[in-house]
Amino acid sequence: MTNFWQRTLTGLIFVGIIVALTLINQFTFLALLAIITLGCSYEFYKITNQKPLTAVHYIGLAMAISLVLGKFWFKYIELLMFSSALLAIMAIVVLFSKQKNWQTIAFTFTGLFYIAVPLVVFYICCFQRVNAGFMVITEKQYNPLLALNLFILIWCSDTFAYLCGKAFGKHPFFPAISPKKTWEGFFGGLILTTIAAYFIALWFGLNPIYNIAIGIITVVFGSIGDLIESMLKRQYNIKDSGNMLPGHGGFLDRFDALLIALPFNCIVYYYLYF
C-alpha cells in the first residue's frame, strides 16, 4: 500500500472513530478523551525520557487517566488528595532509584498540564446549561456538537493551511522550527477556517459570530501548538512522536494543535455556553 493510500485510509478511520465516539453520548466521548490522553502522554514521556519508561512515568500515566476519568469515581477534593498521594509516591520512587533524577518528576507533571488537564477542561465545557421543566431550573447537558465543532475546526485549520501553503507558500512562518510552514498557508488557513466556522455554526445551531471567534482562536493557537510539538521533536531529533497511526505519525502529532488551542477555546465556551 502506497503512503498516500495508507494516510487516506488511516485518516478516514481516525475521523470516523472520533466523530462516532463524540456523537454517541458523554461516556463514549469521555472514553475518547481517555484514549487521547493515554496515547499522547505515553509518547510525550517516551520522547522526553529517551529510554524505556520507568515506574515514575507509569505513575504519571495513572495520574493522567485518573484526572480524565476521576469525576465518575471521586469528588474533586478526593481527586486532588489522590493526585497528591501519587506525587508523594512518585518522589519516593525517584529517591530510591539509581538515577535519583528530579527532572523525571518535572517532565511527568509537564505532561499532565500539557495533555490531561486541557482535555479534562474540554470535557467539562461540552456541557451546556439548559432549562429543565416549567420551574426554569437550569441543568448541564452534554452537547456533542460543541465537541465536534472544535474537532472539525482543527481539521479545517490543518487542511486549509496545508493546501494554501502548498499552492502559494513562499515566505516561511517559523523557519527555525518548521521551515515548510509559510505565512501564505497560515493566512489561507485562517480565512478559510473562519468561513467554515460560520457555516458550521449555522449547521450545528451555534451562534455564527461566536463560532467565528472560536475559529480564529483555533487557527492561531492551533498553529502555535503545532510549532510547540515540532520544537519538542527537533530538540530530541525525531521525525514523528510515534507510529500508532500509520502514515500520520503518533497521537501527539495528530492532537498537538488541539492541546494548545483548547485552553483558549474553552474560555470562550465557558462564558458563552456553560
Image (cartoon, rainbow, N blue to C red):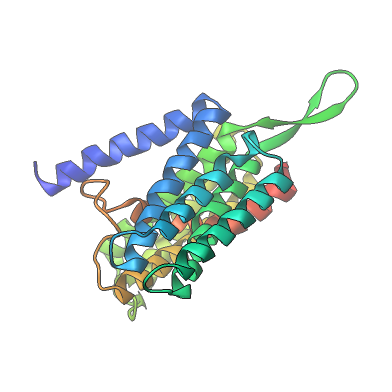
How many numbered discs, if any? 0
> In this rendering, is residue 77 above or below 115?
above
Left or right? Give the position of 215 relative to 4: right
> In this rendering, is residue 110 above or below 68?
below
> In this rendering, is residue 96 above or below 12?
below
The answer to which of 79 and 88 lies nearer the viewer is 88
Left or right? Give the position of 138 relative to 252: right
Q: Residue furthest bottom?
A: 176
Q: Residue 149: horizontal and vertical position, in percent?
A: 53, 41
Left or right? Give the position of 212 relative to 13: right
Q: Residue furthest left?
A: 1
Specify the quadrant that holds the C terminus: top right
Left or right? Give the position of 46 relative to 220: left
Q: Residue 238: horizontal and vertical position, in percent?
A: 25, 68
Residue drawn at the location 40% of the way across and 63% of the way down: 226
Q: Residue 266: horizontal and vertical position, in percent?
A: 63, 51
Q: Residue furthest front?
A: 96
The answer to which of 156 and 94 lies nearer the viewer is 94
Instruction: Tell me where residue 20 sits by quadrant.
Output: top left
Q: Residue 236: horizontal and vertical position, in percent?
A: 30, 73
Residue drawn at the location 33% of the way across and 81% of the way down: 176
Q: Residue furthest right?
A: 135
Specify the quadrant that holds the N terminus: top left
Residue drawn at the location 66% of the way across and 42% of the way down: 207
Is residue 166 at all visible to an observer of this figure?
Answer: yes
The answer to which of 142 and 244 lies nearer the viewer is 244
> In this rendering, is residue 139 above or below 263?
above
